[in-house]
Image: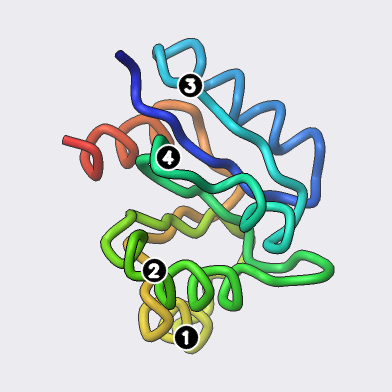
Amino acid sequence: MAATILTVDDSKSIRQMVTFTLQQAGYSVIEAEDGKDALTKINSSVKMVLSDLNMPNMNGIELIKAIRANPSYKFLPVIMLTTESQGDIKQQGKAAGATGWIVKPFNPEQLLGVVKKVLG
């Protein structure tokens, strides 16, 4: 049974690219368009969250904090997938509980490498 990954991005094209890449590698994917949408879709079958940082309604940092506030998801891996690469923003992500950071644009092999490393 393939792991289920929740991908969160306000860009439909990015979600489609991530979904395609993950599905080709055998993963199940749930898509959400922002942090608030993600919180309604997250469930016990989700083994990892890939989230953009800059989104309307609820950004990636707020999403991580909301996920970490729920004891059921305290150890759920959350990878930021974003154009942001500044050290201070990465530090905010780490402080909020981000597991890792992938800078866009990314290549599919890089994405799958991180997913496989985190999920074992």
Residue that mark 2 sits on: 98
Distance between the Cα atoms at labels 4 and 2? 16 Å
Q: How far from the left and from the top, in percent, is residue 3?
A: 35, 26
Residue that mark 1 sits on: 92
Q: State which quarter of the image contains the N terminus.
A: top left
Relative to 56, say whether 8 is above or below. Answer: above
Name which residue type carries label 3: Ser
Name which residue type carries label 2: Ala
Which circle's residue, 3 or 4, is located before the other in the chain? 3
Name which residue type carries label 1: Gln
Residue count near mark 1 (Cα–Cα under 10 Å), binned few <14, some 14–19, many ≥20: few
Residue at (50%, 59%) from the top-left corner?
80
Which circle's residue, 4 or 1, is located before the other in the chain? 4
Mark in front: 3 vs 2: 3
For label 3, the SS is strand
Mark in front: 3 vs 1: 3
Label of residue 46 in the image:
4
Mark in front: 4 vs 2: 4
In this rendered view, identify the residue nearer to me: 2 or 103. 2
